[in-house]
């Protein structure tokens, strides 16, 4: 690995561990309010390490971003796709009651999960399935902490099965589109980012 890759990986872990320690400290509300910056930082690291043309990258992430936004709007305002839920205040600026960072998060998770899938198999269909499955598993962990962190909360505090089914469909479509572009990424950084996310939310399952 190059020195730059080591630096980026180190920063990703530094921010993750700092976030964990900050949230379990007395300054938890301040650290939780920084969640959008943490997600934006991870996405920025991915972009800085891309080895592809910018216009191809924008096309590749367009569907995850747009599809993520549309389905979230339908969910928040009409109870469709994922069930009936509302977003809290710790994810930043909202449009139609959907935080913009959530759309960025759809792009981030699509990229890093796709990179993991590419390391496992060359079969595109299986890669898409693996990538979508990883995104669902992460969502299962996030759902446990989301209400406590003021990220979002489902009606009656019950996460419906439609949420996971909807996640799988949207994640599959997003990955199928994104992976069709064969974007050249730094898979090592992607693996560390998705590992950090799993570690972060796994810890708060028991906290």
Image: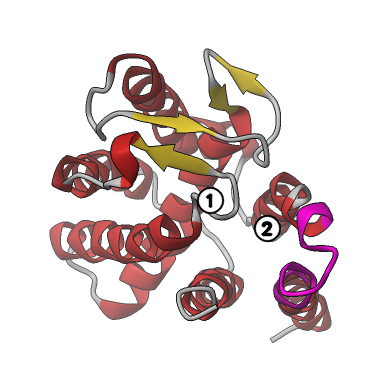
Image: 96 above or below 138: above
Find numbered disc 1 in the image and state the secondary structure of the residue it sits on. Answer: helix
Q: Residue at the spot x=32%, y=69% of the render?
A: 117
User: Which residue shows up at 44% across the image and 25% down it?
Assistant: 69
Any mark on residue 195, and which? none
**The stretch drawn in magenta includes residue 189:** no
Q: Which residue is mark 1?
A: 108
Look at the numbered discs 2 and 1 and tell me whether their residues touch, using CB distance below 8 Å: yes
Task: Report whether residue 115 is seen.
Answer: yes
Span of residues in magenta: 19-30
- The crowd level at tag 2 (other Cα within 10 Å; few <14, some 14-19, many 20+) is many
12 or 177: nearer the viewer: 12
Q: Quadrant of residue 132?
A: bottom left
**Residue drawn at (37%, 57%) of the image:** 139
Task: Using a 10 Å C-alpha cutoff, classify the residue at mark 1 as few (fewer than 14 neighbours), some (14 to 19) or many (20 or more).
Answer: many
Q: Is residue 97 left or right of residue 71?
A: right
Percent position of residue 184, x then y: 52, 58
Quadrant, the N terminus: bottom right
Q: Main secondary structure of the magenta part?
A: helix
Q: Residue at x 55, y 61 (%)?
A: 185
User: Which of the two discs, 2 and 1, labels the residue nearer the N terminus?
Assistant: 2
Whether 182 is drawn above or below 17: the answer is: above
**Which residue is outermost to the bottom?**
1
Q: Residue 189 at x, y = what percent?
A: 61, 72
Label of residue 42 in the image:
2
190 and 171: which one is in front?
171
Residue 26 in magenta stretch: yes
C-alpha span from label 2 to label 1: 8 Å
Q: Secondary structure at mark 2?
A: helix
């Amino acid at each position: 690995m190059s020195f730059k890759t080591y630096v980026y990986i180190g920063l990703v872990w530094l921010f993750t561990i700092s976030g964990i320690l900050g949230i379990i400290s007395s300054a938890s509300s301040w650290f939780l309010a920084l969640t959008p910056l943490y997600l934006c930082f991870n996405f920025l690291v991915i972009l800085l390490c891309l080895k592809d043309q910018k216009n191809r990258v924008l096309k590749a992430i367009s569907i995850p971003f747009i599809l993520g936004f549309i389905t979230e709007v339908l969910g928040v305002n009409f109870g469709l796709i994922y069930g009936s839920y509302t977003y809290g205040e710790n994810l930043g600026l909202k449009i139609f009651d959907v935080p913009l960072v959530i759309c960025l998060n759809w792009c981030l998770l699509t990229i890093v999960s796709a990179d993991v899938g590419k390391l496992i198999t060359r079969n595109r269909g299986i890669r898409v399935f693996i990538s979508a499955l990883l995104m669902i598993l992460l969502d299962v962990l996030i759902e446990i902490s989301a209400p406590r962190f003021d990220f979002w909360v489902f009606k009656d505090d019950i996460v419906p099965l439609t949420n996971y089914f909807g996640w799988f469909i949207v994640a599959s479509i997003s990955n199928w589109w994104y992976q069709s572009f064969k974007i050249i990424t730094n898979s090592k950084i992607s693996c560390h980012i998705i590992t950090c996310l799993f570690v972060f939310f796994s810890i708060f399952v028991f906290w």
